[in-house]
Image: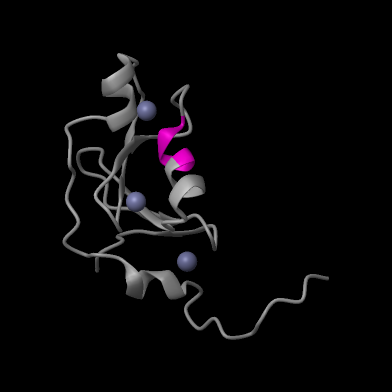
Amino acid sequence: MASETDSEENGCPHLATMNPKSHPHTRGCEECLKSGDTWVHLRLCMHCNHVGCCDNSKNKHATKHFHATKHPIMRSLEPGETWGWCYVDELGFDPLLG
Ligand SMILES: [Zn+2]
Ligand SMILES: [Zn+2]
Ligand SMILES: [Zn+2]
């Protein structure tokens, strides 16, 4: 049994810390654009506007960005997709921005 704090109400305290007006720095994954790599899907960091590639992409830059920066919330940048994800709580939100 993991003994975690019981302070979670709707599950994710990080939603309050993100920037709801976050919008992408670049048109593609920042690191892949630099290295000339390709990606499958794009993810936007809701804390610093970093654009990274998803876990189906070989470089997984969105997840690497979380590990490097501890920025917990990202959203999909795919057309028509409104969901977001908290890496810390491993919770999904759809839509992320009510
Ligand atoms: Zn969270
Ligand atoms: Zn990438
Ligand atoms: Zn970030």
Q: Which residues are magenta?
A: 60-64
52 vs 92, left or right, is left
Q: Write down the quadrant of residue 25 in the picture.
A: top left
Q: Residue at x 42, y 43 (%)?
A: 65
- Relative depth, front residue between 92 and 63: 63
Does 34 sit above or below residue 51? above
Q: Main secondary structure of the magenta part?
A: helix
| Picture quarter with ligand 2 | top left
Q: Position of residue 1 (x, y in %)?
A: 83, 71
Q: Residue at x 30, y 14 (%)?
A: 36
Does 58 sit above or below residue 4? above
Residue 29 appears in the rendering: no
Does 74 sit above or below residue 9? above
31 vs 61, left or right, is left
Does 17 sit above or below residue 83? below
Position of the C terminus by quadrant:
bottom left
